[in-house]
Image: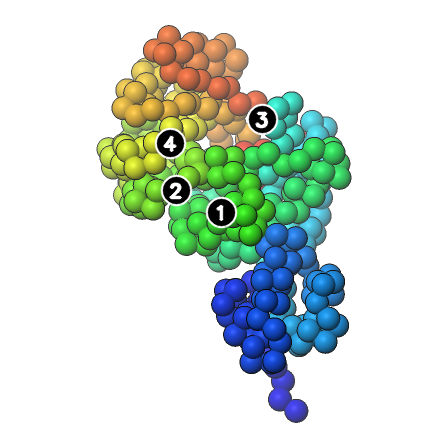
Amino acid sequence: METIVKKDIRKQSIAQIKDFLAEHKEQAFRAKQVYEWLWKKSVQSFEEMTNLSLKTRELLAEHFEIRAVKVAEKQVSSDRTIKSSFELYDKNLVEGVLIPADDRMTACVSSQVGCSLTCKFCATGYMDRKRNLDPAEIYDQVVRIRDQAESHYQTPLTNIVYMGMGEPLLNYANVIESVNYITSPEGLGMSPKRITVSTAGIAKMITKLGDDEVKFNLALSLHAANDEKRNQIMPINESNTLEALKEALLHFYKKTGSRITLEYILFYKFNDTLDDAKELWEFAKQFPCKINIIEYNPIAEANYTNTDPQTLSKFATYLEGKNMVVNVRRSRGKDIDAACGQLAGKKK
């Protein structure tokens, strides 16, 4: 008897599912039901599709599989942050984080297994990039973290940030498709304005986001506002200079009308002087933006340390004096390596 090679059903369009069902003498409207189970109700098995007959469910299970992302390990921080190690169908691991705050419940999700960008201060940058995540694998992280928010804190998920492992704009098509499943009425129905995609700065892909007139928010991990310094910590800057990024961000704003977030980690005696603040202001004043000053989370692979509170205060005050919108983001989940820049898919 011939062995059937099962296809990943979440890589099938609704039209393809309809064609498959028609071929097997099933009614066409069943395709819509299957699609709803997959993307609205987020089932992990065909058995859960209870409004389909047993025969239909067995037919689907014979020809398809649902490659559901599973929580391999979960750690809860003293500050209520939850880090999950997610196991993919091929046994690769990525990490995602639930960040609870008074006014929001945020899921931080990964877009790649590892990363190819080698930012010097980030644990993920010291890993190899193994592969891109597909849309369903990104979607599943959101669903698992949403379930944690509801079961641990009885609070719905309010925000999603693509700030986990990997560079989202180097997995462009899959990231865009995952956002579609998360935001569409046929999917999770979340508002795109609740989603932020963070990039280390791929100018041509930022331009493409503008051309595609995306509805979600964009954050740029800047961390230095002169090319020489930024080249030292973020090698991607050598081919995506600040000038190129400025042009791309202006284009993005013109096309979408969305204010950009600039993320800036203050490293001790590297980028934390008032001269650095002035350079940041010179860069930031060119388009509507807000600045998130982020507390650094040291990693074993790098020698950078966090700046002191007085320096941080002076830096922020300078920018506020220039009428910049400034938020100081305190570190979350540091005790379980869940904080910004610490995700590395380590198995305990």
Measure how far apart labels 1 and 4 are at the Cα level.
17 Å
Amino acid type of disc 2? Answer: Val
Position of residue 112 relative to residue 341, above or below, is below
Mark 1 vs 3, N-terminal side: 1
Could you tell me residue 107's position as x and y percent? Answer: 59, 38
Q: Residue at x 40, y 51 (%)?
A: 172
- Which mark, residue 258? 4
Q: Which residue is drawn at 42% across and 17% down?
A: 325
Question: What is the crowding at mark 1: few (fewer than 14 residues within 10 Å), some, or many (at least 20)?
Answer: many
Q: Name the residue under label 1.
A: 179
Mark 1 vs 4, N-terminal side: 1
Position of residue 89 relative to residue 334, above or below, is below
Position of residue 67 relative to residue 318, above or below, is below
Measure how far apart labels 1 and 3 are at the Cα level.
26 Å
Circles 1 and 4, Cβ within 8 Å, touching? The answer is: no
Could you tell me residue 97's position as x and y percent? Answer: 62, 39
Circles 1 and 2, Cβ within 8 Å, touching? The answer is: yes
The residue closer to the viewer here, 304 or 20, is: 20
Mark 2: secondary structure: loop
Could you tell me residue 216's position as x and y percent? Answer: 44, 38
Q: Mark 2 points at which residue?
A: 214
Instruction: Give the label, 1 or 3, closer to the camera.
Output: 1
- Which mark, residue 331? 3
Circles 1 and 3, Cβ within 8 Å, touching? The answer is: no
Could you tell me residue 13's position as x and y percent? Answer: 50, 64
Mark 4 vs 3, N-terminal side: 4
Instruction: Give the label, 3 or 2, closer to the camera.
Output: 2
Mark 1 vs 2, N-terminal side: 1
Measure how far apart labels 4 and 3 are at the Cα level.
26 Å
Amino acid type of disc 4? Answer: Ser
